[in-house]
Image (cartoon, helix red, strand yellow):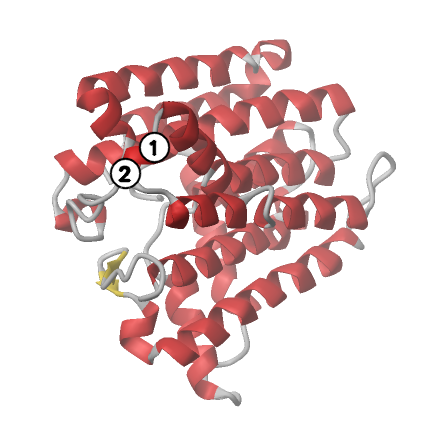
Amino acid sequence: MAHDISGHLAGLARQVELRLPQLLPDLDQRPESVHRAMHYALTSPGKRLRPVLTLAVAEMFGTQVRSVVDLACSVEMVHACSLILDDLPSMDNARLRRGRATVHIEFGEGVAILASFALFNRAFELVAESGHRLALSRYTTEDISHHLATSIGTGGLIGGQALDLESRQEDLDLERLEYIHSHKTGALFIAAGEMGAMAADARRRDLDLVSRFAKNLGLAFQITDDVLDVTGTTEEIGKEAGSDGDKVTFVKLLGVEGSQLLVKELLQFAVDSLAPLGRRADPLRELAAFVEHRSR
């Protein structure tokens, strides 16, 4: 992401990049295979959009980034966990992720599963550790943990993935597809934004604004993924281009142009929700612009 967004947001991404490996066990610590797989999955080249969203929101409400960076990294750990599971032979059976062999190809399926759950566990350890360092009055560490857990459960990421696995092409329409991706992808975006707002002890009405922004940002991000799967190359997108060929996607339902128009509409909704926050929300507007114009 540091190569895609300039200025301050790129600096936030770099802080995440530097911190991520520091939060994992040493590579030579037992069990070495699981720790190597955790590092491999978590530090592979990525956009870091979710943790940057957490940091940008917290900073917008007056909290120093250094007090929130570990919390932001917990979101990236959950995301990395979900990618490992998503790529497994029993799921999407993917061989390439972020320009490298998927974790189960590199380390074996058993180690990949263990590494994914180790990242998941470490994420919640970090939430607990980070929460106690924050000066909170409106929220508690338990509130932050609950929001993250809810985004992962059957009402969030797991629910979206389950429906995706169960769906047949003839079953899918725009409403069902939106449900899948607003849960499979969008729920963690919402949690990332909300966790940043809660870490900054933002007002409840401001938390609602951030949630609305993140919901539309996350769905727009997924639709651009569908577009890039058709218009991008394997080198550009870091995974096998056309890998969604057997799936029903927004592009198959709306076409490339229709999908791009929907992205613009969703991002306009996202940006409009920031109006009460004024100029201090400009970094979030920049994130929206990045999602609209990203090429990988």
Is residue 284 visible in the rendered structure shown here?
A: yes
Find residue 248 and report its horizontal and vertical position in percent: 27, 36
The outermost residue toward the front is 170
Find residue 24 and report its horizontal and vertical position in percent: 54, 71
Q: Residue at x 48, y 53 (%)?
A: 79
Disc 2: CA contacts within 10 A as few (<14), some (14-19) or many (>=20): few
Between residue 164 and residue 287, name the one nearer to us: 164
Is residue 8 visible in the rendered structure shown here?
A: no
- The quarter of the rendered structure image containing the N terminus is top left
Disc 1: CA contacts within 10 A as few (<14), some (14-19) or many (>=20): some
Location of mark 1 (residue): 172
Pointers 1 and 2 in contact (C-beta within 8 Å): yes
Q: Amino acid at mark 2?
A: Gln
Which image quarter: residue 217?
A: top left
Between residue 146 and residue 195, name the one nearer to us: 146
Q: Is residue 91 above or below residue 75?
A: below
- The quarter of the rendered structure image containing the C terminus is top left
Mark sitting on residue 169: 2
